[in-house]
Image (cartoon, helix red, strand yellow):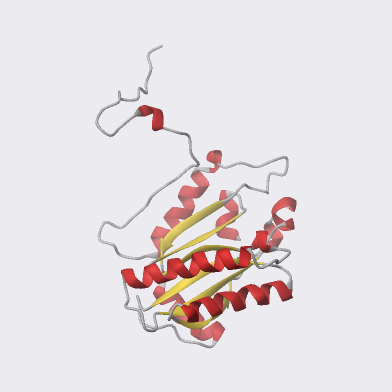
Amino acid sequence: MEKTHIQPKAQGLYDPQNEHENCGIGLIVDMKGRKSHDIVKGALEICVNLDHRGGCGCDPITGDGAGIFIQLPHNFFKAVCQAECGFDVPAEGDYGVGFVFLSRDDEERQSEETIIEEIVAEEGLDFIGWRDVPVRSEILGKASKACEPVMRQFFVSKGEVAAGLELERKLYIVRRLATHRIRYSGTDEEALFYISSLSSRTMTYKGMLTTEQLEQY
């Protein structure tokens, strides 16, 4: 039988020895950079079609993780934050959104949130507020349910910082400082703390889910 896939020989900067297996990845874009819900729906469909690249144990409804990476949905946040959270978001590009996994313990979670707010202020940014991410925990398997964090989003205005790349750099610094400070804060549930994304341009929705659970959750 002839081989149907043969890696090219080493040439230039390419070396076939650097090739490795990876999780399933799909990409869908609008070539003109336009945002639409259809792109998100397409991304979710890609996830489902890549279910064979995910993993699960003896419990078929506990996955090893799935997620999508999207442009920041400004129009969505403009509507939902005013209706649900009681605050308005700034103009598009003038703020960032963090998606964070927090401790289930009320006291620990309050401490984590306070640390984030303090670091935002230290970096010359303005903290706007928090939003609870609606989830459907009842669809989770036993293992993923046991380690499910509290999922929240926080909103940060650019404050004294210029929009664009400078704001992105500041948000990256906030993310790294918060992760480091909470990791060494002595909290019992620091393992649950994780900032999935923090950016003025993009955001990540993900969790310990199967690909089919991602949209449902």
Rendered residue at 44%/66% (across/down): 172
| Figure check: 136 above or below 128 | above
Q: Where is residue 90 in the image (x, y as percent from the top left)?
A: 39, 83
Residue nearest the observer in this picture, 120 or 33: 120
Q: Which residue lies furthest to the top in this view?
A: 1
Foreground residue, 148 or 187?
Answer: 187
Determine which quarter of the picture holds residue 203.
bottom left
Q: Residue 5 falls in which quadrant of the image?
A: top left
Give percent across and percent down for residue 215. 55, 58
User: In the depicted view, which residue is nearer to us: 213 or 111?
Assistant: 111
Residue 53 visible? The answer is yes
Which of the 4 image quarters holds residue 217? bottom right
- Look at the image and tell me whether residue 200 can be seen: no
Position of residue 212 in the picture relative to residue 30 (left or right) = right
**In the displayed structure image, the side of residue 81 where residue 57 appears, left or right:** right
* Residue in view at x 43 percent, y 70 percent: 171
Could you tell me residue 43's position as x and y percent? 44, 54
Q: In which quarter of the image is the N terminus?
A: top left
Q: Give the residue drawn at x 50%, y 70%.
A: 98
